[in-house]
């Protein structure tokens, strides 16, 4: 092979390498958190979202649930997550049986802890409705899943065990308030926050 031909091939390979690295790996393996596999992508509102990060919510030494955050592109801060305009998903898989009413209360408290009082007061009807959604299910058992999706043009959709729960919550602020439970300045679990934002533990 001539020196010129070899140089051309190497140059072409060098140009192609960044493009190859930017593509998602074919058949990429799920990411496992707390023994729960999270697929590297999810289809939401006809769009392919990427798994931004996944981790485990602990209470004391006990594992409560595993959560994964899916976004249209990678985000390393809560502000970057909020700034994304496309669909978003939080997927939660229970790692222990839990009273759903208690879980609803914890979510309400998590929203309140990460908002100023005036902003939270505007969302109280939605917060009460969300608490009722979980109360209606009595218990969430180990392995059961719920998702919280932000769907542009539709609102926030809560799906429990594969069944959407009533009408969407229309306000964009409601989804951001829910995200605050995990990504706010006073998150439910700091290590889970870092994991959802793709930071190594």
Image (tube, rainbow, N blue to C red):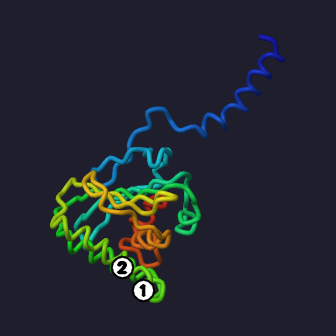
Is 196 rendered above or below residue 135? above
Residue 147 or residue 96, whichever sits in front: 147
Residue placed at 31% from the left, 62% from the top? Answer: 166
Residue 125 circle label: 2
Is 200 rendered above or below residue 116? above
> Residue 102 location, x and y as percent?
21, 75
Residue placed at 31% from the left, 56% from the top? Answer: 164
Location of the C terminus (image quadrant): bottom left
> Residue 41 location, x and y as percent?
45, 44
Residue 93 visible in this rendered orientation of the protein: yes
**View extreme (bottom): residue:** 117
Residue placed at 42% from the left, 63% from the top? Answer: 156
Left or right of 191 in this view: 197? right
Is 146 rendered above or below residue 131? above
Q: Nearer the viewer, mark 2 or mark 1?
A: 2
Question: How many residues crowd mark 2 within 10 Å: few (<14), some (14–19), many (20+)?
Answer: few
Residue placed at 34% from the left, 57% from the top? Answer: 147
- Secondary structure beneath disc 2? helix
Whole-angstrom CA distance, mark 2 to mark 1, is 9 Å
Residue 201 visible in this rendered orientation of the protein: no
> Residue 108 location, x and y as percent?
33, 78
- Secondary structure beneath disc 1? helix
- Which residue is denoted by mark 1 in the rendering? 121
Question: How many residues crowd mark 1 within 10 Å: few (<14), some (14–19), many (20+)?
Answer: few
Is 175 rendered above or below residue 54? below
> Residue 53 location, x and y as percent?
44, 55
Location of the N terminus (image quadrant): top right
């Amino acid at each position: 092979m001539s020196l010129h031909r070899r140089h051309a091939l190497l140059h072409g390979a060098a140009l192609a390498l960044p493009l190859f690295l930017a593509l998602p790996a074919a058949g990429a393996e799920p990411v496992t958190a707390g023994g729960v596999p999270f697929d590297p992508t999810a289809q939401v509102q006809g769009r392919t979202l990427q798994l931004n990060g996944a981790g485990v919510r602990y209470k004391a030494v006990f594992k409560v649930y595993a959560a994964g955050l899916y976004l249209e592109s990678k985000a390393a801060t809560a502000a970057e997550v909020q700034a994304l305009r496309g669909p978003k998903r939080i997927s939660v898989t229970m790692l222990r049986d839990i009273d759903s009413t208690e879980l609803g209360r914890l979510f309400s408290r998590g929203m309140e802890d990460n908002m100023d009082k005036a902003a939270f007061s505007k969302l109280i009807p939605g917060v009460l409705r969300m608490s009722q959604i979980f109360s209606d299910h009595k218990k969430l058992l180990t392995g059961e899943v719920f998702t919280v999706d932000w769907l542009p043009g539709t609102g926030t959709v809560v799906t429990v065990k594969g069944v959407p729960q009533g009408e969407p919550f229309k306000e964009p602020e409601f989804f951001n308030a829910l995200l605050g439970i995990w990504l706010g300045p006073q998150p439910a679990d700091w290590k889970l926050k870092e994991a959802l934002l793709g930071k190594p533990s």
